[in-house]
Image (cartoon, coloured by chain):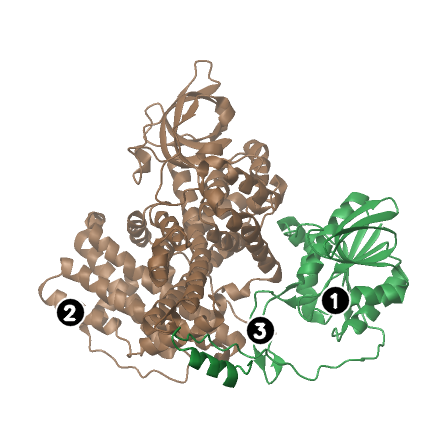
Amino acid sequence: MKILTCISHVPDTNAKIPFKDGQPDLNGISFVIAPYDDFALARAVELRDQTKGKLTVLNVGLADTEPTIRKALAIGADDAIRVNAHPHDAFYVASQIAAIAKQENYDLILMGRESSDFNGGQVHGMVAEMLGLPCVVPCMKLDLNGNVAVMQREIEGGKEIVEVALPFVAGCQEPIAEWKIPNMRGIMSAKTKPLKVVEPVAVENYTRIIKYEMPPQRSSVKMIDKDNIGELVRLLREEAKVL
Amino acid sequence: MEMVERKEALKGGEFLIRESEAHDVFIPEDFTEEQRMMAQACTDFLRTEVFPNVDKMEDVESGFMIELMNKAGELGLLGISVPEEYGGLGMSFNTSMLVADVLGTGGSFSTAFGAHTGIGTLPILYYGNEEQKRKYLPKLATGEWKASYCLTEPDAGSDANSGKTKARLSEDGKHYIINGQKMWITNAGFADLFIVFAKIDDDKNLTAFIVEKSYGGITMNDEEKKLGIKGSSTRQVFFNDCHVPVENMLSTRGNGFKIAVNILNIGRIKLAAAVIGACKDVITMATNYANERKQFGKPISSFGAIKHKIGEMSALTYATESAAYRAGQCIEDKINSLIAEGMDEAQAKLKGVEQFAIECAIMKVHGSEVLDYVVDESLQTYGGMGFSEEAPMARAYRDARITRIYEGTNEINRMLLVGMILKRAMAGELDVLGPAMAVAKELTSVPTFSAIDASVLFAEEKEAIKGLKKAVLMVAGKAAQTFGPALEEQQEIMMHVADMIIETYVAESALLRTEKLIGIRGEAACQQYINMARLYLNRAADKVAYHGKEAINSFATGDEQKVMLMGLKRFTKMNPINATAIRRELADFVIEQNKYPF
C-alpha cells in the first residue's frame, strides 16, 4: 500500500497575524501542519501500520517549510517530498501534486478538507480531476477492506457511507483519527528519514491576490434608556440606517 | 566562519571572580529544531492530555495520574535522560532541562514526572551497577514501572542524615531487612519501585537500596491532604521487615547521603527549569485576563498598576530562564569534557553536576521565588476572580508554594551555596581569596573613576556587574574573616550573602543572553530584551545593596562598618534609569502579543 499525504505549512491557528503595507506580516509567527492535514496524516499513519505499507508526505513550499515536513516525519511518515516552490494557489499546488502522483501510482492520496490559511478547499478535487480519480470530501471515517475503502461523510441532516475502490483522493477532517503527538524517538529519527526536494513543473498562475482587507471593526454596543424610545428610533434611522 | 576563541570553561562558583563572554554562554534561542520539536511535543501532550483533564488529575484517588504517566511513557518523555542502551533516549542535559521547563506548566503532573524521572530514576542510573541498570532502567524509561524516592522521615527533613530507618542483614546473609517510616513520599501511591535510604545497624551514614514493591512489608497511610499539587500522590510509607535482596544495595554501604545530596543537585536545577514553563504560562493567562477584563470602560491592561506587574513578571522570568540554561549548559559542557577525558558517562554526569552544585542551589532558590512572585501578582491581576477556584490562578498559586520547600528548602539551599563557596575557597579549588583581598585593598584606596566607553554595548552594565561581584567578595570575605568556620552558625548573614550571590549571577546571565542575542538579531530587534536585562540589573543592584547593608550592620562596627558601607554604596551604584518607563514599554509589548512572548 502506497499512501501519499499532502500537508500545508500554515501559521499556528492561535497566532494573531498583523498586516503590514497591506500584506500579512509573518515575522515571528510559528508554523504548523494545517489542522485538517494533520488529521489526514494521523489516519494515514494508522493505515500504513495496518497495511505495512509506505507513507510519503508531500508539501509544496520553499525551504522554510522543512521543519513542518520533519514534524510529519516525526509523527510517522516514512519519507517526504518537498516541491520547491511557493504555493501560489490551489491550481498550482494541485498541479504539482498531480505531477508527482502520476509517476508514483499511490493507492491513497489523503489531505485535509481545506488548509487553515486560505481555506480554499479545492486542492483535493483538482488533484482527483487531474489524475482521473474519484474524490471524497469531507471524509470523516476511512476503513480499508482489501482494495475498497469505506468512508463516512457528513451531509445535511445525516451521514453518508461511501464505498470507493482504490486508488482515490480524500479530503479529510475529524473524527477520522486523533491527532498524533510525535514521540521522542520519532523526533530523533525524523532527521535521518529521506526528504527529497524536487523542482516544480511549469504551471501558469491563473489567479492573483489584489489586496487584503480586514473586516470592518464592530462598533461598541450603545445602551439606550428604556424611556428614550425617540432616541432609539433616531439612531436606528440615522446611524444604523435600518429603518 | 568566524573563529570564536573559547576560553577555558568556567568552574562552578567561578562566575564570582571571572567574567564570561556572551558567545560562550548558552541561551534558549540556541536550541535546535529537534529540541524545539521535542518541546512542542511536550506542549501538545499537556494541551491534549493534561489541561482538559485538570479536575480529574487533581483528584488523586482517581488514578488518572497513572494514566498520564503511562501516556508520557509512550511518548518517550520518561526516558529522556536514560541512555539508549538502557531503553531511553540519551538526550543531553539541557534537552532534559527544556523538557522539564515545558512540562513545568503541568502542575501536579510536573511533580509526578520530576519525581519519577529525577530522584526516582537517577540514583540507579548514576550509582547502580550494570546488573541493576539493566534490570530497572528500561522499565523506568518506558514508564512500565513508576519510581519514588524515600529519604525524608518525620524527624529527618532538612537534616536528612539523621534518619532512623534501619536495615539489618538477615541471618542467611541474603537480605537486608528494612524497618522504618518515611514521609512526604511523592508518587508513593502508585510506585512499583522505591529508592530507600536507611542506616545499616548502627552506621552513622545512610545507605541506599532499590526496593521493589513486590518485596512486601510496605504499607502506606492515606494520601496527604495538601495545600497544592493535589493530584500528585504523597504518602507516608512504612517498612515493616521489608526483605530486600543484598544485591539491591545501591553503591556502597554508607554512601547513601552522598547519593541523596548529588541527586538533589540535579533535582534543584531541574526544578528551576520547571518553574520557567509555569511562569510563562501564568503570565500569559494574566495578560489574557488583563486584556479582556474591563473596568472604568477600559481593559485593565491599560492601567499602569497592571503594566507594572506584567513588566516585572516578564523581566524576572526572562532572567531566571537565562540563568537556568546558562548553568545547564555549563553542566553539559563539563560532562562532555569529562567523557572526552575518558570518564564513564554516569560518573561524568555526577561530577559535572557536582561541579556546579552552587549554581544548582542558586537556581532552585531564585526560580522558586520568582514563580511565587509571578503566581501572586497574576492572581492579583485577576482580582476577585483570582480568589475563585473557577479561574486557574488559585490552583497555580497553591501549586507553586511547594517549590520553595522541596528539593531542599530555600533556607537550606541558601546556606549550602554560601557554604560550598567557602569550602571550595578553603580547599583552594576556587580562588576567591585573592580577589577578596584586592577588593579589601580597593576599599581603603582612593576610588578611581575610570571612564566608561559608552560606545561599547552594555559597557556600563558590565561595570555594574563587576561592582556587584566586588560587593559579594567584600561582605562574604569580611564575614568569613570575622567568624571563621563559625560563620555557618550566623545563618542570617549566610542568607544575606546568598541573596547577594544569587542576584549577581542572575543579573549577569540576563545581560549575557541579551548581548548574545543582539549579536545574532541586531540591537533594533532586541529592544524588549534590553529592557528586561536593564530592569533586572537595576533591581539586582538594589537587592545587593540591601542585603549587603543588612549583613555588614550585623557584624561590623566603627570605622570598619563605615568603610564597608561606603564600599557597598560604591559597588552597587548605578546610573539612574527610568524603570517605570522601561517596564511600561515592556508591558505594552507583552500586552500587544497577549502572551509571554520571549
Q: Can residue A191 be seen in the rendering of this structure?
A: no
Which is more toward the observer, B521 or B7? B521
* Chain label for disc 2: B
In this image, B3 relative to B184: left or right?
A: right
Which class describes the residues within 10 Å of circle 3: few (<14), some (14-19), or many (20+)?
A: some
The residue lying at 43 percent from left, 81 percent from top is A230
Discs 3 and 1 lie in a common subunit: yes
The chain letter of the brown chain reads B
- Disc assigned to residue A17: 3
N-terminal of the two: label 3 or label 1?
3
- Determine which residue is flagged by label 1: A121
Q: Can residue B185 be seen in the rendering of this structure?
A: yes
The residue lying at 51 percent from left, 57 percent from top is B333
Residue B518, image x and y in percent?
49, 76
The chain letter of the green chain reads A
Which class describes the residues within 10 Å of circle 2: few (<14), some (14-19), or many (20+)?
A: some
The amino acid sitting under disc 3 is: Ile
Residue B226, image x and y in percent?
35, 41
Mark count: 3
With respect to residue A83, does A42 lie above or below?
Answer: above
